Image (cartoon, rainbow, N blue to C red):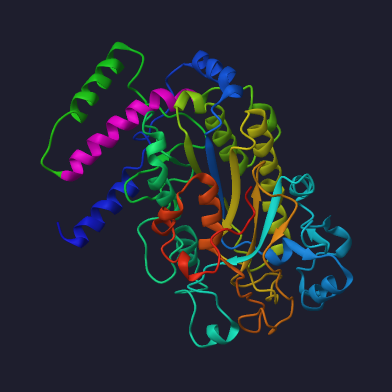
């Protein structure tokens, strides 16, 4: 088979045949199974680990997410993001934090109160000024053309953040490639390592594995295939059809995935459709879509003894952060959804006995320009700040050098406040992958360009 047909086949399988159980919806009633599994959760195996990727679609403005709170630092901020610009956050509105390893006060966006509490409790770290890079890059090198492909393009930077490859297109993401390396740990259960609540996305695509795609609401069982005699006969006919052999590789692959989806539905459907006494109380007052996604993830983690998974990677998404105008209101509303959802999820993992076994982290297209644009917004930029949450995180600290808030200064790639990243997404991801159990010898298979950077462990995981 030629390369173009191989690529087409992989794309078809990834996009059309992700384990969504063929549009499955709830018909099973296995509440007792879930109750039994949750009773066992507190004694879950200590070897279990999960990574939860929270993608902030559109490019979150990191410059209004974390702001220097000392007199000189805030003055530098206010000199560019003036009150007249329409995007200035008043100093008194910021939520103070003081990273232990820095000794300088910073302020979080006023809608991130729950994250302020997690940071102060040592359950969250900030990784400052991370971005897509081909190598450590100075301003002079950037001007000479050393930079990622299509640096300020949404589609390209979303793909590069999710693939950790910035010089060519990739058909796999670093979440999927991590899953390839640890898949053997789930071999006895046969449960997929990766689960997505956002359909088929590049981050979840591996070389040898496909993600499980579950709904934010509703069920994961074949609608119209369970219950009555007619429905049971329909299910038997479907199983017989999927058991047919074929010389067509696409048909063979579809049948294999269909059979696996049907098998998984008997495990997954009761998890996503039933109540979860361990985690539900933390989400009762939350109505946002990101909270609903994280609620489903929390239920899956609480039921880990039922699924038999030893390693799990989850992908959820919130958007849109593409704030070219009306940024103050739009970012405030997004953070008002995100902050309580992340806190509820963290508290739910603790209740499920997995606080040290689950690490949640954020990624986004890019930062936004420090210099405001007309209409109370900002344009596309580069290095950005991210959150990492969990009991295994060396929390209460800031990792990386916070950029100098000076237009055209030494950390500005140009003259608009597009920060030269201090760390590469490769290093950020590799630190998480190491904690997750990827062997040092296999790290280059997950992050092919990792050797271009001085460190593969940024130190924010214990």
Res. 353 image quadrant: top right
Q: Is residue 292 magenta?
A: no
Quadrant of image for the N terminus: bottom left
Find residue 133 and report its horizontal and vertical position in percent. 51, 71
Q: Nearer the viewer, residue 193 or 245?
A: 193
* Residue 28 in view: yes
Q: Nearer the viewer, residue 166 or 225?
A: 166
Q: Is residue 257 magenta?
A: yes
* Vertical order, 382 against 443 (above or below): below
Residue found at the very far left of the displayed protein:
247
Left or right: 298 as drawn, with respect to 406: left
* Residue 173 in view: no
Find residue 315 and report its horizontal and vertical position in percent. 51, 46
Res. 385 image quadrant: bottom right
Q: How many marks?
A: 0
Q: Nearer the viewer, residue 122 or 315?
A: 122
Find residue 129 and report its horizontal and vertical position in percent. 64, 67
**Residue found 67% across the figure and 76% down from its top:** 373
**Residue found 37% across the figure and 56% down from its top:** 172
> What's drawn in magenta, residue-wise?
249-271
Magenta: main secondary structure: helix
Left or right: 249 as drawn, with respect to 120: left
Find residue 448 and report its horizontal and vertical position in percent. 41, 63
* Vertical order, 130 against 223 (above or below): below
């Amino acid at each position: 088979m030629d390369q173009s047909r191989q690529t087409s086949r992989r794309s078809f399988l990834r996009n059309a045949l992700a384990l969504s159980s063929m549009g499955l919806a709830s018909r099973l009633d296995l509440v007792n199974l879930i109750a039994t599994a949750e009773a066992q959760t507190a004694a879950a195996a200590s070897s279990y680990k999960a990574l939860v990727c929270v993608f902030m679609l559109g490019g979150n403005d990191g410059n209004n997410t974390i702001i220097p709170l000392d007199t000189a630092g805030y003055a530098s901020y206010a000199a560019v993001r003036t009150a007249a610009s329409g995007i200035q956050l008043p100093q008194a509105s910021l939520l103070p934090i003081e990273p232990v390893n820095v000794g300088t006060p910073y302020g979080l966006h006023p809608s991130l109160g729950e994250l302020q509490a997690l940071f102060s409790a040592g359950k969250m770290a900030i990784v400052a000024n991370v971005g897509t890079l081909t190598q450590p890059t100075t301003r002079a090198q950037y001007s000479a053309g050393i930079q990622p492909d299509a640096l300020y393009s949404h589609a390209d930077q979303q793909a590069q953040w999710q693939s950790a490859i910035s010089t060519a297109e990739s058909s796999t993401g670093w979440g999927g490639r991590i899953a390839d390396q640890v898949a053997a740990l789930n071999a006895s259960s046969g449960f997929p390592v990766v689960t997505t609540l956002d359909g088929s996305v590049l981050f979840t695509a591996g070389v040898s594995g496909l993600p499980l795609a579950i709904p934010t609401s509703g069920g994961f069982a074949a609608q119209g295939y369970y219950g009555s005699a007619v429905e049971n006969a329909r299910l038997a006919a479907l199983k017989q059809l999927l058991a047919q052999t074929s010389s067509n590789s696409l048909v063979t692959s579809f049948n294999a995935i269909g059979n696996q989806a049907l098998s998984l539905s008997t495990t997954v459907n009761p998890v996503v459709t039933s109540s979860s006494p361990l985690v539900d109380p933390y989400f009762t007052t939350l109505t946002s879509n990101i909270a609903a996604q994280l609620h489903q993830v929390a239920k899956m983690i609480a039921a880990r003894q039922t699924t038999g998974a030893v390693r799990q990677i989850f992908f959820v998404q919130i958007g849109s952060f593409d704030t070219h105008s009306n940024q103050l209101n739009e970012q405030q509303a997004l953070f008002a959804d995100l902050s309580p959802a992340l806190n509820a999820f963290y508290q739910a993992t603790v209740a499920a006995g997995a606080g040290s076994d689950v690490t949640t982290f954020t990624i986004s297209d890019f930062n936004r320009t420090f210099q405001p644009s007309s209409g109370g917004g900002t344009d596309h930029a580069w290095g950005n700040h991210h959150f990492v949450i969990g009991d295994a995180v060396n929390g209460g600290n800031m990792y990386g050098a916070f950029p100098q808030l000076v237009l055209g200064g030494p950390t500005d790639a140009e003259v608009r406040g597009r920060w030269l990243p201090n760390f590469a997404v490769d290093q950020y991801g590799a630190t998480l992958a190491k904690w997750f159990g990827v062997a040092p010898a296999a790290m280059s298979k997950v992050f092919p360009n990792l050797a271009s950077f001085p460190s593969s462990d940024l130190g924010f995981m214990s």
